Image (spheres, helix red, strand yellow):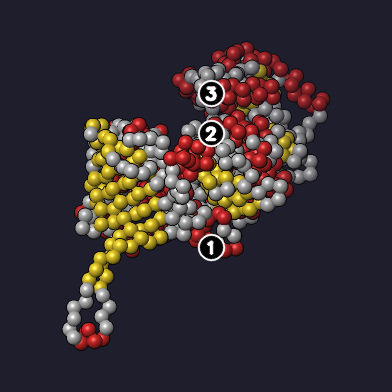
Amino acid sequence: MAKHQFQTEVGQLLHLMTHSLYSNKEIFIRELVSNASDAIDKLNYLKLTDDKIKAALPEDWSGEINIAFDEADNSITIRDNGIGMNEEDLIASIGTIAKSGTKSFIDNLTGDAKKDSNLIGQFGVGFYSVFMVASNVDVISKKAGEETAYKWSSTGTGEFDLGPCTKEDIGTIIYIKLKDEEGSEFVSKHRIKNIIAKYSNHIAYPIFLNYSEEVTEELSEEDKKAGKEPKKTTEKRHEKINEATALWTQPKAKLKKEEYNDFYKSISHDSQDPMLTIHTKAEGVSEYTTLFYVPKTAPMDMYRADYQPGVKLYVKRVFITDDEKELLPTYLRFVRGIIDSEDLPLNVSREILQENRILANIKQSSVKKILAEIKKLSKDEEKYKEFIEQYNRPLKEGAYQDFTNKEALLELIRFKSSKTELGEMTSLAKYKENADSEQKAIYYIIGENEKVLRNSPLLEAYKKNEIEVLILDDKEIDEIITPMYGAYQEWEFKDITSCEAPKVEQSEEEKKEVEEKFESITTKIKDILGEAVSDVRITNRLSESPSCVVKDAGDAQMAQMMQMMRAMGQSMPESAPILEINPEHDIVKKLNGCADDAMIDDVSWVLLDQAKLSEGMEITDAVSFAQRLTRITSKAL
Ligand code: ADP
Ligand code: MG
């Protein structure tokens, strides 16, 4: 036996397991059974695709999980005949190397023991949960296709022992020596049965409970009278304690909501019921079953590049993979569930999966089905609000990535708008309904702060004309995605920082006249501001504010490109904005006739800086801004 150190993060995790996360200890059984089931899935698949493995297995091999408990010893043993682990596997999977999830698990801990133990499964740190109840754990395992078996042993503090041992058949035995206080309650037939019924009833393999029971002999009346002592014998029990059928193969009509929910919890490691359950059997050209769930709370890793896909692929009930991100489009990565195809060959390889027609069809219909169910949910405003709180952002991604379903996705997205209350949202369908007959576009403004956006001077003309403007405050994603929407039912999306202001009741002559009247001052301001602006012009989009900054339509495209480059980590300069001034405003009128050059200089800069500030942008030189304001104010007094 050689000693190995746990990697730092694993050590931290183990410490947490043993000291903080004790509110929901029973889940260690769910986690170990789920690992056993995964291991059998893997061997099942190898048996069908690898002749050498097949030859090494007994003719009548079929996967099963055995749980045994021993009162005298205060221990539980969980045994599977799955794929097993060799020395490297043991080190990599349950030893020195922390998986990518481990660190983020630790970072995500809230300190609330109950919530935190719900995170255990989600982060793929399931095995370690055994140390909530164990004082010592032995993992004895022999991997399919290999000669040597190994024993891994640890008390869950700092280090583990690892070395060769003897074991006849392929598979894994997990021997759990329970802690006297925190663990003893699990050495119980009823307790284990209940836990399995709750979490693992629809694991596709039989789970047997093995234990000894003392049986007292039934005495006849005569013997009783004769005062005979009943004989006590110990009998061995081998009892199947789960349903052991793949839930999704059963007819919909037979399944209860509770069974669906339990199955969801067993595959997702979530402790909440799902928000949506979608069970579909397709027959005809292509035959398959899908069972999808939408979690109530978005998975923790939804915004991580290395997120764990939530959908497992089966072929004729045989597990193929749970690590294929292409089974559904990436924007639906929050969906959990299974796809079981009757038509795919069992030996599908990764490469084949990527471009397989059958799978592409399943994927396409699945997306349609999921979106249709989400649409149904949207009829219930309260429930849909909860959905949107979790998943608005992935829907936006979808409208950008999935051209075929763009319209359907745009209908599902919800938007803040100039006509909704703070915190309320609207849909594009409602937006169109509310617009008057002349409107032909969907107007929006993007920024970081909802309040700032709502007060932006750029909205003034729209408010005056009662035109609704979408308030997009998820800047990081909105800025890249919104311009790509193109149109919704032929209404183009228009950024109000770069498009013409709406419905201006002003003739060309009038416009020209005003421009001429203010020509000298606009030129002067432009000279003063130099490179800080790309142009200065008269506008009629403002009513209360003296000035605003906007972008050229061409610049807007440029700005979007730059934003994308920035998102990819490149540093890109902001392009200079156009300063627009309001000829109806007192400041601008007075500035036009002003003879004090120093004053014109100060006011020009203030017009630019305060426009930027009120649109939520940063100004480059706050000190000068303050100094100018002081000078202007003291002159004004
Ligand atoms: P996860 O199951 O999410 O991968 P776990 O911490 O539960 O995370 O298990 C870690 C890894 O250990 C598994 O991915 C698997 O490779 C290995 N493992 C655990 N239990 C078994 C088992 N009974 N048989 C084979 N491999 C196992
Ligand atoms: Mg696991």
Q: Compare marks 2 and 3 and give the one earlier in the sequence.
A: 2
> From the Cβ of disc 1, is ligand 2 less than 8 Å away?
no
Q: Compare marks 2 and 1 and give the one earlier in the sequence.
A: 1
Q: Of the residues shown, which amino acid type is indicated by label 2?
A: Glu
> From the Cβ of disc 2, is ligand 1 less than 8 Å away?
no
Q: Of the residues shown, which amino acid type is indicated by label 1?
A: Lys
SS label for mark 1: loop
Q: Which residue is mark 3?
A: 568
Q: Nearer the viewer, residue 38 or 519?
A: 38
Residue 495 appearing in the image: no
SS label for mark 2: loop
Q: Nearer the viewer, residue 4 or 72?
A: 72
* Residue 584 horizontal side relative to residue 626, left or right: right
Q: Compare marks 1 and 3 and give the one earlier in the sequence.
A: 1
SS label for mark 3: loop
Q: Residue at x 24, y 49 (%)?
A: 177
Q: State whether residue 509 is above or below residue 470.
A: above
- Measure the C-alpha gap from mark 2 to mark 3: 19 Å
Q: Position of residue 550 (x, y in %)?
A: 64, 26
Q: Which residue is mark 2?
A: 448
Q: Which residue is mark 1?
A: 256
